[in-house]
C-alpha cells in the first residue's frame, strides 16, 4: 500500500481537484483506492457525491468507531472514500488531546490496517499547517504539492520544505507540481522554462488552466467521466502515470 497526500499550506491551488482526479484515474486502471477527505470543507466528498452522516471524529480518534465503518463505496469501481463534513473542524484539537496522552502518530495508525484492502490511499488535506498536517507529513509515502507558478507559491513550498528539514522529515518525499498553468502569462512561461532549484523533485507533468476543472462541480464527477478526451483529463492521466512510477508499490522504485 502507498499513501499519498495532496498538501499545500496555501488554499485554492488544486489539492482537492487533483486528489479526486488522480484517485479516480488510479481506480479506473484497476488500483484499489481509498480517498480520505480530511478537510472540513468536504469538497472532495461533495465532488464525488458521497453521502456521509456526521463523522464523530472524537469516536474515531479514541477508537470507539473503527475507521472501517466510515468507508463508503463511490459510484466508481475500485474507488472508496471516507467523506468529511464540518465535524472535522475540531480534528486538530482532538489530535492534540490524544497527543497529550502520548498518541502522536494516530493518522498513520488509522491508515495502516487498510494495507489489507487497498493499494493506494489518497489524502486530501486542508490548507493549514497544523498537528494534522504534521501527522500527514509522517504518514504519507509521497506528498504532492500543487503550485501555481508564482513567487508566493514557491515561498509556501519553501516553508514546508524547511519544516521538513527542521523536523528530520525526508524532504525528498515532497513533490511540487505546476497547476493552473497559463502559457500566455510571462511569469508562468519563465518559471516553467527555468524551474527553481527547490523544485528539483517536482513532477514533470504540468496541469494547464482549464475551465473544465470547474465543471467537476456541475457534474459532481471526476473529469474522466464527462470529458475523457479533454487535454486536462489527459494531463491527470499522465500525472498519475508519473506518480505511479515514483511509488514503490507500483514500480519497485523509491517515492
Ligand atoms: N487546472 C485547473 N484549471 C482551472 N481551474 C482549476 C484547476 N485546478 C483547480 N482549479 C479550480 O481552482 C479552485 C480551487 O481548486 P481546489 O478546490 O482543488 O483547491 P484546493 O487547494 O483543494 O483548495 P482548498 O485549499 O480550499 O482546499 C476550484 O474552483 C477549482 O475548480
Ligand atoms: Mg481542497
Image (cartoon, rainbow, N blue to C red):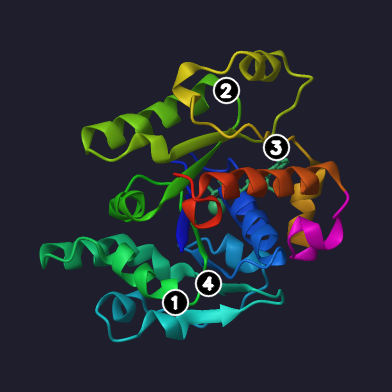
Q: Which residue is mark 1?
A: 116
The Cα atoms of the two marked residues, 2 and 3, are separated by 15 Å
Which stretch appears magenta? Answer: 219-229
Mark 4 and mark 3 lie on one chain; the one further toward the N terminus is: 4
Of the numbered discs in the image, which one, if any, rests on residue 83? 4
Q: Quadrant of the C terminus?
A: top left
**Circle nearer the N terminus (2, 3):** 2
Asked if residue 198 lies in the magenta stretch, the reply is no
Disc 4 and disc 3 in contact, CB within 8 angstroms = no
The residue wearing badge 2 is 150
Q: Residues within 10 Å of mark 1 (few under 14, many from 20)?
A: few
N-term-proximal mark, 2 vs 1: 1
**Mark toward the start of the polypeptide (1 vs 4):** 4
Q: Nearer the viewer, residue 47 or 204?
A: 204
User: Residue at the right extreme?
Assistant: 229
Label 2, label 1: how many angstroms apart (C-alpha)? 41 Å
Element under disc 4: loop
Asked if residue 250 is positioned above or below residue 80 in the image, the reply reads: above
Distance from disc 1 to disc 4, alpha carbons, whole Å, reads: 20 Å
Mark 3, residue position: 207
- Residue at left offset 33%, top offset 56%: 132
In the image, farthest residue toward the front: 252
Q: Position of residue 77 (x, y in %)?
A: 70, 75
Residue 227 on image: x %, y %? 86, 55
Q: Residue sitting at 39 percent across and 46 percent down?
A: 128
Asked if disc 4 is less than 8 Å from ligand 2, the answer is: no
Q: Is residue 39 visible?
A: no
Q: Residue at x 88, y 50 (%)?
A: 229
Amino acid at each position: 500500500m502507498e499513501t499519498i497526500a495532496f498538501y499545500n499550506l496555501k488554499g485554492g491551488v488544486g489539492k482537492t481537484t487533483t486528489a479526486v482526479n488522480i484517485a479516480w484515474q488510479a481506480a479506473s486502471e484497476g488500483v484499489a483506492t481509498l480517498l480520505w477527505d480530511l478537510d472540513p470543507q468536504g469538497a472532495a466528498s461533495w465532488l464525488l457525491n458521497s453521502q456521509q452522516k456526521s463523522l464523530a471524529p472524537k469516536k474515531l480518534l479514541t477508537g470507539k468507531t473503527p475507521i472501517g465503518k466510515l468507508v463508503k463505496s463511490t459510484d466508481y469501481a475500485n474507488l472508496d472514500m471516507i467523506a468529511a463534513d464540518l465535524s472535522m473542524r475540531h480534528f486538530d484539537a482532538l489530535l492534540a488531546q490524544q497527543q497529550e496522552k502520548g498518541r502522536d502518530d494516530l493518522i498513520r495508525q488509522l491508515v495502516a490496517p487498510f494495507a489489507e484492502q487497498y493499494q493506494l490511499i489518497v489524502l486530501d488535506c486542508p490548507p493549514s499547517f497544523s498537528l494534522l498536517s504534521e501527522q500527514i507529513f509522517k504518514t504519507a509515502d509521497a506528498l504532492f504539492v500543487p503550485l501555481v507558478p508564482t513567487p508566493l507559491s514557491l515561498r509556501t513550498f519553501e516553508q514546508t520544505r524547511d519544516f521538513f528539514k527542521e523536523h528530520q522529515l525526508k524532504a525528498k518525499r515532497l513533490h511540487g507540481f505546476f497547476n493552473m498553468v497559463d502559457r500566455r502569462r510571462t511569469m508562468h512561461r519563465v518559471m516553467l522554462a527555468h524551474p527553481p532549484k527547490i523544485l528539483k523533485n517536482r513532477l514533470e507533468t504540468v496541469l494547464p488552466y482549464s475551465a473544465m476543472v470547474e465543471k467537476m462541480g456541475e457534474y459532481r464527477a471526476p473529469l474522466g467521466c464527462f470529458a475523457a478526451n479533454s487535454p486536462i483529463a489527459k494531463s491527470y492521466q499522465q500525472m498519475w502515470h508519473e506518480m505511479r512510477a515514483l511509488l514503490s508499490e507500483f514500480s519497485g522504485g523509491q517515492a
